């Protein structure tokens, strides 16, 4: 009798858990049906396959459910996606949304631990974000010396183009390499050796692709890594993390041995580790902050330059208008950030490119720190919130003919630059991208410096696709171009 009773109790408990797993919390945002154990994961995956990216899939689901707050359950995780400027600004500005998810998947992104700056919250985030921003500035980040580093990278890019001027050039990793070298100079005091730089970029590409393809599975059922480590992508990500760790550890070791002469962020962090009452300043924390800085700078800024070059390649009249403004305003002078106020049309064009091609279509993720309300819906504590930015940047109510490049949107009737509050290329609020000064300066100086010297033509009369590859980030599809000297 007892075994039968135990079996009945177990069956009842299992049934209760199954029922509980498919019942939505009261006043939770509308969204697709939840299935036992997997929630709405299969629906999202099917839509992603159909539409080519998770951002497009979730946007389509929000339209199907006629909501600007989409409610999902991915595995055991409650997920909400917010749309519309009112809701997006609420998430950006209110402290309830300052948290970061504390799941296996996000720890895996941070080399297996909940460390760094990007994916932590609370006192650790506040202390280390403030320290990182302060000490990067102390070693020259965001100052004139940074412009000189960017200009030096521009000279090297021009040399590369000149060496390959008689053949089509693949517009791919050369810009990511350049921005990483600028960033690494302030983090680790030196350029990255070319062979290591190529390997590092390859690792980040593979890592980003692995997270895009398998993140859902690892996030929703992390125990699958024990059963299918290869198929789930877990083994690949662990191997990549190890190789990236070795590159960062080598840089730290050189600093411990005083082999690097320039003052930089790693030296500042090591000094802090030697201070009393600095328990959070550990070797592993230093490694993860370095990883955060590299990831934040390498792909996003490089992709922005590539989108700008793709756009002038596809719009010859705009390209010539930009060149004429550069020639008539600064001539052959080496471009600097101060020129951005003089090159009004060029600066407006770059803003327009960032609007049309949002590098992070889905910003976040955020973890809700306490029960809260968005647009009348109750969002339970610990829910993960994603912020849809690309749909704001393409909203026809805010931007007439949103898919057309019109730099004039950012120019007033007097011919001066004007700001627009409906664009969020670097996010907003307390978690706004701390590297926006590098990104803005780099994109402007490199883009102007190339248009100043070269006309960019398509190869064999074939225009590259304007469609982006959208994974964790948006990037242009690989393309080649002819860089024709204007001299």
Image: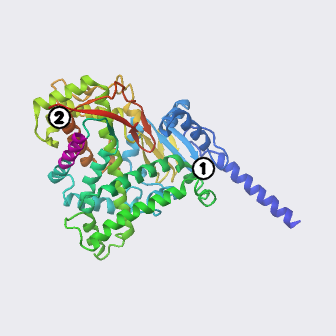
Quarter of the picture holding the N terminus: bottom right
- In the rendered structure, the answer to whether residue 326 lies left or right of residue 222 reads left
How crowded is the residue under tag 2: few (<14 C-alpha within 10 Å), some, or many (20+)? many
Residue 189 location (% of width, % of height): 23, 62
Across and down, in percent, residue 313 comes to 30, 29
Which residue appears at 25% of the width and 67% of the height?
Answer: 268
Quarter residue 404 falls in: top left
Quarter of the figure that contains the C terminus: top left
**Above or below for 162 versus 251:** above
**SS class, disc 2:** helix
Q: Which residue is mark 1?
A: 75
* 88 and 291: which is toward the camera: 291
Region of the chain picked out in magenta, as a range: 151-163
Alpha-carbon neighbours of circle 1 within 10 Å: few (<14), some, or many (≥20)? many
Task: Tell me what residue is drawn at x 23 percent, y 38 percent.
Answer: 447
Viewer can see residue 424: no
Q: Secondary structure at mark 1?
A: loop
Closer to us: mark 2 or mark 1? 2
* Residue 7 position (above or below residue 458): below
Q: In the rendered image of this protein, does residue 213 appear above or below residue 2?
A: above
Task: Please indicate, yes or no, whether residue 452 appears anywhere in the rendered image.
Answer: yes
Determine which quarter of the picture holds residue 100. bottom left
**Image spot of residue 259 (x, y percent):** 24, 70
Q: Name the residue furthest front.
A: 166
- Identify which residue, 466 or 127, lies in the foreground: 466
Distance from disc 2 to disc 1, alpha carbons, whole Å, reads 52 Å
In the rendered structure, find residue 452 and report the number of the disc placed on it.
Answer: 2
**Residue 160 counted in the magenta span:** yes
The colour scheme used to paint the residues is rainbow
């Amino acid at each position: 009798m007892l075994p039968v009773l135990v079996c009945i109790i177990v069956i009842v408990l299992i049934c209760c858990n199954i029922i509980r797993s498919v019942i939505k919390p009261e006043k939770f945002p509308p969204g697709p049906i939840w299935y036992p154990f997997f929630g709405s994961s299969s629906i999202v995956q099917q839509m992603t396959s159909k539409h080519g990216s998770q951002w497009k899939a979730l946007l389509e689901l929000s339209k199907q459910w006629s909501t600007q707050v989409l409610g999902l359950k991915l595995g055991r995780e409650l997920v909400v996606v917010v749309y519309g400027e009112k809701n997006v600004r609420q998430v950006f500005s209110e402290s309830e949304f300052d948290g970061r998810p504390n799941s296996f998947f996000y720890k895996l992104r941070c080399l297996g631990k909940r460390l760094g700056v990007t994916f932590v919250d609370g006192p650790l985030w506040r202390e280390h974000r403030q320290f990182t921003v302060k000490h990067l500035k102390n070693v020259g980040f965001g100052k004139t010396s940074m412009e000189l580093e960017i200009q030096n990278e521009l000279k090297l890019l021009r040399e590369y183009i000149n060496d390959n001027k008689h053949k089509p050039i693949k517009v791919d990793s050369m810009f990511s390499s350049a921005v990483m070298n600028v960033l690494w100079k302030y983090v680790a005091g030196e350029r990255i050796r070319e062979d290591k730089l190529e390997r590092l970029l390859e690792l980040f590409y593979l890592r980003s692709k692995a997270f895009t393809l398998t993140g859902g599975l690892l996030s929703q059922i992390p125990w699958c890594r024990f059963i299918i480590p290869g198929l789930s992508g877990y083994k690949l990500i662990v191997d990549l993390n190890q190789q990236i760790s070795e590159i960062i550890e080598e840089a730290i070791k050189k600093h411990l041995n005083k082999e690097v002469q320039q003052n930089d962020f790693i030296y500042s962090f090591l000094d802090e580790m030697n201070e009393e009452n600095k328990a959070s300043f550990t070797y592993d924390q230093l490694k993860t902050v370095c990883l955060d800085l590299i990831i934040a700078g390498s792909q996003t800024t490089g992709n922005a330059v590539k989108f700008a070059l793709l756009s002038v390649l596809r719009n010859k009249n705009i390209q010539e208008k930009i060149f004429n403004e550069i020639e008539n305003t600064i001539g052959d002078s080496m471009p600097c950030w101060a020129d951005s106020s003089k090159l009004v049309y060029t600066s407006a064009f770059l803003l327009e490119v960032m609007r049309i091609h949002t590098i992070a279509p889905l910003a976040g993720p955020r973890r809700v720190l306490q029960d809260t309300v968005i647009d009348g819906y109750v969002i339970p504590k610990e829910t993960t919130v994603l912020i849809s930015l690309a749909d704001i940047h393409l909203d026809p109510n805010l931007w007439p003919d949103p898919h057309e490049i019109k730099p004039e949107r950012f120019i007033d009737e007097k011919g001066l630059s004007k700001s627009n509050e409906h664009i969020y290329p670097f996010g907003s609020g307390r978690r706004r991208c701390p590297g926006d000064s590098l990104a803005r300066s780099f994109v402007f100086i490199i883009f102007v410096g190339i248009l100043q010297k070269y006309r960019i033509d398509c190869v064999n009369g074939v225009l590259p696709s304007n469609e982006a590859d959208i994974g964790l980030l948006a990037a242009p599809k690989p393309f080649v171009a002819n860089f024709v000297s204007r001299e």
